[in-house]
Amino acid sequence: MDRFGKTREENSKKREPLYMIGAVSRMFNIHPQTLRLYEREGLLTPSRTEGKTRLYSQEDIEKLEFILFLTRELGVNLAGVDAILRMREQMNELQRQVEYLLEFIQEEMKKRYSEDLESQKNALIKISKVGLTKVDDYIYNKYKKE
């Protein structure tokens, strides 16, 4: 399971190419040339069939939704979108590393203090669990227009 409670199978299903360019353009009311432009700019990378047909996965669709949110709702240009996407990926990687570190620390604490449970219950300070917020959710909730 990943940090969002999804199994590897669920994650691989998100990457499975399902949608052709026409279907995606109709879903989001954008011209197919816009999708091709996003691909040329490196913002989207759909997979291709042997006949060179573009196929978009659910993961691509979610990324496109974020790109459209940035451009339509926040007025960000494509260079800005590219920078935001790169920073988002770096932040996601940092979040994965922090989660791994937190899990490691929790396991080490369990190992070291497992025999001393009674004194932990009577400790002066109780430590609450740390919650992490996905960067996309934070940005979307902070800036979405009502």
Image (cartoon, rainbow, N blue to C red):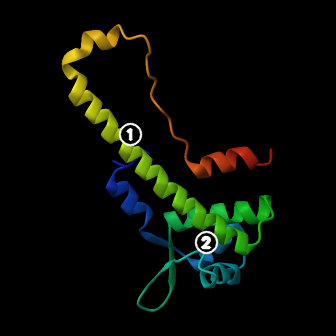
**Residue type at the position of mark 2:** Val
Q: Is residue 27 visible?
A: no
Q: Which mark is residue 72?
A: none
Direction from residue 114 to residue 47 in the image, left or right = right
Residue 137, above or below 122: below
Residue 90, image x and y in percent? Answer: 52, 61
Asked if residue 145 lies left or right of residue 88, the reply is right
Q: Write the residue at 61% across / 47% down.
A: 137
**Measured from the top left, where is residue 60 in percent x and y?**
54, 68
Using the numbered discs, state the Cα–Cα distance from disc 1 to disc 2 in whole angstroms.
39 Å
> For the residue carrying disc 2, how many other residues have a C-alpha within 10 Å: few (<14), some (14-19), or many (20+)?
many
Name the residue rendered at 43%, 66% in the picture: 15
| Residue contact at pointers 1 and 2, CB within 8 angstroms | no
Image x and y of residue 138, in percent: 64, 46
Relative depth, front residue between 75 and 114: 114
Residue wearing tag 1: 102
Q: Residue at x 44, y 15 (%)?
A: 125
Mark nearest the camera among 1 and 2 is 1
| Label 1: which secondary element | helix
Please tell me which residue lies in front, 15 or 31: 15
Identify the mark nearer the N-term, 1 or 2: 2
Q: Which residue is mark 2?
A: 24
Q: Residue at x 67, y 83 (%)?
A: 37
User: Crowding at label 1, few (<14), some or many (≥20) Cα neighbours within 10 Å?
Assistant: few
